[in-house]
Amino acid sequence: MENKREHAGTWLRLVFCLALLCATLCCAKPSPVKKPPPVEPWSCDPDADRAMKAQDYETSIIRHRKFLQKEPNNPLAAYHLGYSYGQLGEHHLEVAYYEKALHLGLRDDAACFNLGMAYAELGESQKAIGAFNKAITMNPRRADGFFGLGLVYAQTGDGVRAEKAFLKAIKRDPAFLDARLNLSMLYADRGEFQKAMAQLRKILEIDPDHGAAKEFLESLEKK
């Protein structure tokens, strides 16, 4: 079996990558973690958004930049431009345009959540925490902001706060499997194997085919 800390770190990085890669904005179906920003009172360039939906991020960037030259105060276009940069790994530009979108008046907890994820990719933990807390303030009923907090606290070694954040996410959405998986890794990392296995078994109750939970549970049961 791999070292538990390496195992946990691998899955934490995977969760960050999946959250960013699977996020969809405006034109596509929302993922379980993300939701699209509000369109009104702004609208974006349809061709630019079609390129973004098709994952043609280079074209999306070109078209969104041209659109912003005509409408420099359009926060939705700035948000989409930041998202497109993020998909190409340009996280400094991603953050810059998310911040611009919020400065221009975009008020949406998903925007703050995405900003927190981008800051986490850059290793700027405190700024990530601030963004996630803004998302929670805007919509305290959603689980996503608490999940993001849990990821950052876990990465920074603050297990107590990470546990509380993951539990709050699960309370708001009991079927939030990524929150349960990361909580199980947190418990296993500090030797609380029964708690870890309880979370993994709950995941498998909800999704019997969850491969990561199966593998992790089997490894813990062999201890």
Image (cartoon, helix red, strand yellow):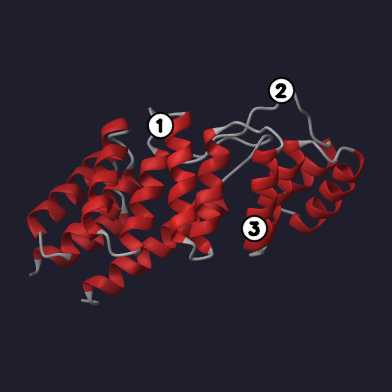
Residue 15, given in percent of the width and then of the height, sits at: 42, 57
Residue receiving disc 3: 87
Q: Distance between the residues labelled 3 and 1?
A: 24 Å
Q: Which mark is drawn over residue 142?
A: 1
Residue 32 in view: no
Question: 55 and 87: which one is in front?
Answer: 87
* Of marks 3 and 2, the one in the foreground: 2
Q: How far apart are marks 3 and 2 (CA)?
A: 25 Å
The quadrant where residue 146 appears: top left
- Mark 2: amino acid: Glu
Residue lying at the far right in this picture: please name it: 70
Q: Earlier in the sequence, mark 1 or mark 2?
A: 2
Q: Which mark is residue 184?
A: none
Q: Is residue 52 left or right of residue 169?
A: right
Quarter of image, res 75: top right
User: Residue visible at 68% across and 54% down?
Assistant: 96
The image position of residue 78, as x and y in percent, is: 74, 44
User: Against 57, is 156 above or below?
Assistant: below
Q: Quadrant of the C terminus?
A: bottom left
Residue 26: percent from left, percent from top: 67, 34
- Residue shown at 81% from the left, 44% from the top: 48
What residue is shown at x 76% (from left), y 27% (from top)?
A: 42
Above or below: residue 216 compared with residue 38: below
Per the image, the residue denoted by label 2 is 40
Pointer 3 and pointer 2: residues touching (CB < 8 Å)? no
Q: Spot the residue most to the top.
A: 41
